[in-house]
Image: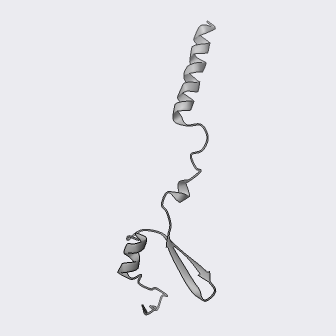
Amino acid sequence: MTHLVGPKGQVVIPKSIRERLGIKPGDRVEFSREDDRVVLWRINPAKPLRGRFRGTGLVEELERQRLADSNREDNR
């Protein structure tokens, strides 16, 4: 498969490859160079969010607040 590089360095990813990788308009892709080749892969949209919401979950936070409220009421 050969394709022409446009004046801005753009290349169209063939439909068969887009379908195989699940690439849709608006998706982000990443490039890397391996020797004299360019490697392209689709970025998992959830990956940038991974680790952002670590720590206490909502349920745990609510349970902690309820316990604190209950303790305050018991001490009155």
Q: Is residue 17 above or below residue 59?
A: below
Left or right? Give the position of 7 relative to 71: left
Quarter-of-image position of residue 38? bottom right
- Looking at the image, residue 72 sits to the left or right of residue 44; the answer is right
Q: Is residue 44 above or below residue 30?
A: above
Residues 39 and 25: in front is: 39
Q: What residue is drawn where x is 42% and y is 90%?
A: 1
Residue 9: % across, % down: 49, 88
* Residue 29 pos. (x, y %): 49, 72
Which residue appears farthest toward the front when viewing the image?
20
Q: Quarter-wise, where is residue 21 in the image?
A: bottom left
- Report x, y in % for residue 27: 43, 68
Quarter of the image for the C terminus: give it.
top right
Residue 6 in the image, given as x and y percentages of width and height: 44, 91
- Rendered image coloring scheme: one colour
Q: Does 14 appear above or below 41? A: below
Q: Where is residue 70, by image quadrant?
A: top right
Query: For this view, does 30 lie left or right of residue 18?
Result: right
Residue shown at 56% from the left, 53% from the top: 50
Task: Say how many tags the image has.
Answer: 0
Residue farthest to the top, as pictured: 76
